[in-house]
Every structure is written in C-alpha cells, then in structure tokens.
Image (cartoon, rainbow, N blue to C red):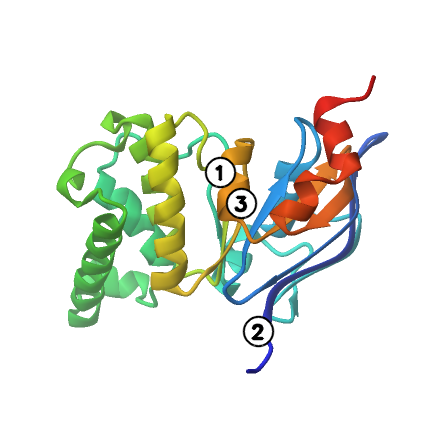
Amino acid sequence: MSERRAILEVVGVNKSFGGLKAVQDFNLTIREGDLQGLIGPNGAGKTTCFNLLTGVYTPDTGEVRVSGHRVEGARPWRIARLGVARTFQNIRLFGALSVLDNARLGCHLRVGHSFAGMVLRSVLHRSEERAIRDRAMDLLGVLGLADRAHEEAKSLPYGDQRKLEIARALATEPRVLLLDEPAAGMNPQEKVELRGLIHRIRERFKVAILLIEHDMGVVMNLCEHITVLNFGQTIAAGSPGVVQNDPRVIEAYLGTE
C-alpha cells in the first residue's frame, strides 16, 4: 500500500505580535484521510495557527505548503482554491440569507462563469446555477438541514448553525477541512451526533480533517492524532492515549502542586 500523500505541511512556523510570541516553531503534516486534533489551554495559540494556515496571518518565518505549493502570504481565497477550508470559533454565517444561499455561496469558489454570462443569463450560467443549487441541497441533506433550506440562517438553533458553517466549507470542495471548536455550545447528545457526522464527512467527501476543540471527550473519542500547544509551543504530539498521559500535557491543563 502506497504512503498517503501530504496535503498540508507546516515547517518551522513562527508568529509574533509585538513582544508576544504567539506561535513558536510550529510543525504539522496532514495527509490524505487524516483526522487530527489541535488542543491546548486558552491562549495556547490554536486559532492563531488556523489563521496562519488559511492566509489570515502571514508567518514571520517558516513554510506552509498546500499540495506542495508554498502559500505564506497568499490571500485566503487562493489557499481555499488549493483545497483548504475552515469554520470559525465564532459562527460567521450570513444570518439574513437563507440556509440554502449560505451553502450556495461556498459553491461559487469553483464556478468559472463570467460577469457577462451572468448578465446575459447564458445557457452555461443557468446550467452552473442549477448544479450549484443541487450540490448545496445535497450538502444540506448530508448535514440534516435540507428541510430548513429556505429559512433564514439566523433562525437556526445554535447546533444547526454550526452544521451550516460546515456545509458552506464543504461546498468549496476542500481536501483539508479545518474545524475551529465545532462542538462549542452543543449539548451532550449533539456532541455525540457531531462525532458521527465528522466520521461520515471524512468518508463521503474523502477530506482530511484538523479540528480545534476544548471538549476532551470529543477529541479523545474522535481524533487519531493530537498535537498539543501551550504558550505557542508544541509540548506533545501523538495518539490520544500517548497525549493524555504526557506529564507536560497534564501540567498544562491542571497545573502542579
């Protein structure tokens, strides 16, 4: 069996804000089919890492490669086109738009029609719009939101808003999906359903997944490999069993006497 190809590679990345070293010598490799977690106490640098991987921030030093392409300094939409999509810790839906329209927006990243075609309502444009609607509805079906397609996004319960954000990210046809605290605000039953959903997403869409999560039950029961940050530094990496028994991880979360 051939080795799975690396999709996202991070080598020696550093980022400072003034005198604060937010991320120090960060290294990570996401391969095809991976389901990995990035954890750490509040302020450890997790979301900063996501912002570095998706073009929100530019590393001070180090390399970020997507399918072999260097992307430091690239605009977020270019990185998305290479196959990296994300959700956000604070939900960023277009609340006044319908659930369907939110999903359709993600699909437009891959559309090739011209402005003139849209104005003239060309046959190609109409065909692409039908395909976009069909894909968006298919994604909403996978996420269990198809029956709410024509409701305003802001009317959805919190857990369903999280699912809609995942649907919009999947609509960009990513190879790597970055989930920033997908279980935040969910009740225990919703968290159980979320774990099953993430497994189904990986299988159906053949996408690698990296998630940030504070709920250790979700992380330990879901991820196959975990990287732990503390004060911007990697203090442990490995399987859930290895990580949860690492003295440095225990100290970072619980402190010492």
The residue that label 3 is drawn on is 211
Question: Residue 218: x percent and y percent?
Answer: 49, 38
* Label 3: element kind: strand
Q: Residue at x 77, y 44 (%)?
A: 234
Nearer-the-camera pick, 189 or 63: 189
The residue that label 2 is drawn on is 4
Q: Residue at x 61, y 37 (%)?
A: 47
Mark 2 to mark 3: distance in Å?
20 Å
* Label 2: element kind: loop
Quarter residue 28 falls in: bottom right
Nearer-the-camera pick, 201 or 236: 236
* Amino acid under disc 1: Val
Question: Residue 10: x percent and y percent?
Answer: 70, 58
Mark 2, Cα crowd under 10 Å, few <14 / some 14-19 / many 20+, is few
Quarter residue 45 falls in: top right
Nearer-the-camera pick, 227 or 1: 1
Relative to residue 207, is residue 236 drawn left or right?
A: right
Question: Residue 80: x percent and y percent?
Answer: 50, 57
Relative to residue 56, is residue 228 drawn left or right?
A: right
Q: Residue 32: in sight, yes or no?
A: yes
* Label 1: element kind: helix
Q: Residue at x 26, y 53 (%)?
A: 139
Relative to residue 193, is residue 234 drawn left or right?
A: right
| Mark sitting on residue 218 | 1
Question: Residue 125: x percent and y percent?
Answer: 21, 65
* Amino acid under disc 3: Leu
> Is residue 32 shown above or below 86?
below
Q: Residue at x 32, y 65 (%)?
A: 114
Image quarter where the C terminus lies is: top right
* Amino acid under disc 2: Arg
Nearer-the-camera pick, 217 or 27: 217
